[in-house]
Amino acid sequence: MENSGKVLLELFLVFAGGKVMAEISERLRQPGVLGELLAGVLLGPSLLGLVRADELTLGLAEIGAIFLLFTVGLETKPRDLLEVGWTAVLVGSLGVILPFILGLWYMKALGYSSIESIFVGAAMVATSVGITARVLADLGALSTRAARVILAAAVLDDILGLLVLAVVSSLSTGQVHYMQLGIVAAEAVAFALVMIFLGSKVIGRFHPHVEKLRARNSAFILSIILCLGLSLASVYIGMAAIIGAFLTGLALADHSDRWKLQENAHPVSEFLAPFFFVLLGVQVNVQTFAKPSLIGLASVICVLAIVGKLIGCGLGCLHLGLKDALRVGIGMVPRGEVGLIVAGVGLSLHTISDAVYSIVLVMSIVTTLVAPPFLRMVLPPPSAPSSFASEGSFQGDRVSPDVLAGK
Amino acid sequence: MENSGKVLLELFLVFAGGKVMAEISERLRQPGVLGELLAGVLLGPSLLGLVRADELTLGLAEIGAIFLLFTVGLETKPRDLLEVGWTAVLVGSLGVILPFILGLWYMKALGYSSIESIFVGAAMVATSVGITARVLADLGALSTRAARVILAAAVLDDILGLLVLAVVSSLSTGQVHYMQLGIVAAEAVAFALVMIFLGSKVIGRFHPHVEKLRARNSAFILSIILCLGLSLASVYIGMAAIIGAFLTGLALADHSDRWKLQENAHPVSEFLAPFFFVLLGVQVNVQTFAKPSLIGLASVICVLAIVGKLIGCGLGCLHLGLKDALRVGIGMVPRGEVGLIVAGVGLSLHTISDAVYSIVLVMSIVTTLVAPPFLRMVLPPPSAPSSFASEGSFQGDRVSPDVLAGK
């Protein structure tokens, strides 16, 4: 009983705290996700100390991110991604190369060792698409061209990030296994391509069988099993679970209307996704920012991390116009937890120092917190008549805030 | 990354395992929930050892039970419960008194001490309504008269169970604090009555404010906050969290259509509730059944636990006809985890022996596993034209199994 109370209290604080702060954030014309991140910082150990990052809350955060990207995948048809395919390849590649070079160059210029500089560069590579996906979804902008480019580029970005991580890990142990590297790359690329090109057709084949099942709402149940299974597969390959979840959603997108998948997945995501964002905040140690000696260096790395993606990704899709280039550039800025994995490997191999790890940490936090407000600014407002409400995508509960406010 | 894989594997096994077994169970004309319970036994430490009852899985189980009962509450209007009020009082009281007397009498007759006999009797008192609620929901029978009696009686049963627990706890420490007991009882009764009589009206008052919120789907978000908060409140009072969740659903039921609460809560419950049932199974230690010396005693206690509720609760609503009396009687049989709390208190106070604890454990498992098939047998089949599809209750995804099977 006592334990039940503790668990419930933590859940209540995370969910209610996140949602209250999201509401405040929206009223200040900021994205809701910013409020949830800040709620986490507030509730976490470094300030109020009411919520810990424990097995349960981190588990819920992980499921929340998976459901969020699954839902985003369901709203994205494979052909929408393929249409922007080459643009996404450019955006993804330039957005990986530029931040890497900038980070590497700056650290080298300051006199750090090559290997430490490479690690910092590598940690600046990978975009965490969760934050951007949420802002896009909140504004109902998932079917805009910029959103498609971002989502397609994020898949490529994750594969490239995986390879960069593999290379820097091998570098620090002294030897690069080209063979293994090739296999990892081939697996990741094959997984993504199969999901994008064949997933939808394979699932279509199973359609008659699904309708024969006895369970209530069996298509939704099966889609969850598929989503969890393929997220797991993508972790085994070495990719992020959320990329597997996104690709599963993508493969199911063409069947989503018939099986009412969006209507079902949306509420689950609405309940669980806040755990992901609040927990990102809970894991922020405010004291990281309190080291005067690092502030200068960290600020420059943050600027380079932002500029690197902004220019790298922006250049990759400049042919779509300056507005879309800006949207894509800002959308690819948040690094979330991905850079920390790279830095964590460096730390555990003793190739980077605690100080450098802290800098990467600050870079992750700052890029994550800075992107949402700017992204919201450059995206069309939700009430404006734009292209994103077309194609009959699920808009069930998305009453525009302005309508709700009685404007 | 590695941890992410472990978490996902466990989630995948619980959800996919539970749902595959549920499907098999349905094909054998058994309730799906039985399959989920057995999947848990199979996956748990005593057989395959693939899933553990850890912080995350138990947390998800708890949230699953809360969402399940919240959803059930949303489908039950307060006036539906009040209509069967006096019947439920009879059913609840007799269903508590008879098992208690039977257990106490039998243990005394065997020569056990008074205090140990009282503990066994007390452990046989409380119904765990989750199992029954799930079977009723699966068959679309939540708005039948029997279902209403069961749900109303379950609230009372939980309050009585709380008092019994308080009394036996005090007995074993030597002194009964009548004052404290009175306060606990008053709090619990007041909480339930306020939720049933006033909850709906109070929430109605807030309606204009809810519509002013900026958040997407704000009514659903608020309903979750309310549900978590009041589940927490009910734990603090000493009641089960699921009773708080049920009462929250009840208070929101009249507003459910306008705010699309059922449509939103259903999928969340469909994803999370299986964790509750599979985890109930995971926590079953098969070896408990392998003590020959206890089999005789345990069997008699199981029979008494079943007969006690069947006759006690059945008598309480015999005026509704034999069929409904049988439905209510069987529906109140499952003890789930509630009896274990009582027995656990006894064990920790050294008032009952390990052997007696095992007997209570067996009783909990057997009553939980036995009830669903029989309940399904006595309820009208989901495809039959009966009263339960009336009143415009949410039937969105509930295609009858026979329709799905193409019959």
Image (cartoon, coloured by chain):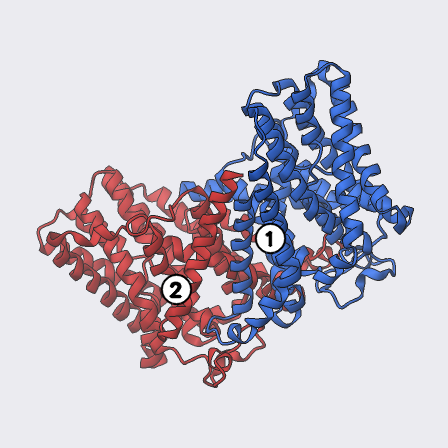
Chain colours: A blue, B red
**Residue B139: which quarter of the image?**
bottom left
Q: Is A220 rendered above or below residue B383?
A: above
- Where residue A15 sits, quadrant-wise, is top right
Residue occupied by mark 2? B21
Q: Secondary structure at mark 2?
A: helix
| Image position, residue B119 (x, y; %) | 23, 49
> Secondary structure beneath disc 1?
helix
Is the residue A280 above or below the residue B68 in the image?
A: above
- Relative placement, left or right, of A247 versus B17 is right
Q: Label 2 is placed on what type of residue?
A: Met
Q: Amino acid at mark 1?
A: Phe
User: In the picture shown, does residue A346 fall above or below B147?
Assistant: above
How far apart, in angstroms, are the residues tagged by discs 1 and 2? 29 Å
Does the rendering let one see residue B65?
no
Q: Is residue B145 left or right of residue B317?
A: right
Q: Position of residue A21 (x, y in %)?
A: 69, 42
Q: Position of residue B308 (x, y in %)?
A: 24, 65
- Which chain does the residue under circle 2 lie in? B
Residue at image position (63%, 53%) is A192
Say the numbered circle drawn on residue A191: 1
Q: Nearer the viewer, residue B252 or B62?
A: B62
Residue A5 position in % (x across, y down) = 46, 43
- Number of residues whose C-alpha sits closer than 10 Å to that of mark 1, classed few (under 14), some (14–19) or many (20 or more): some
Residue A366 in view of the camera: yes
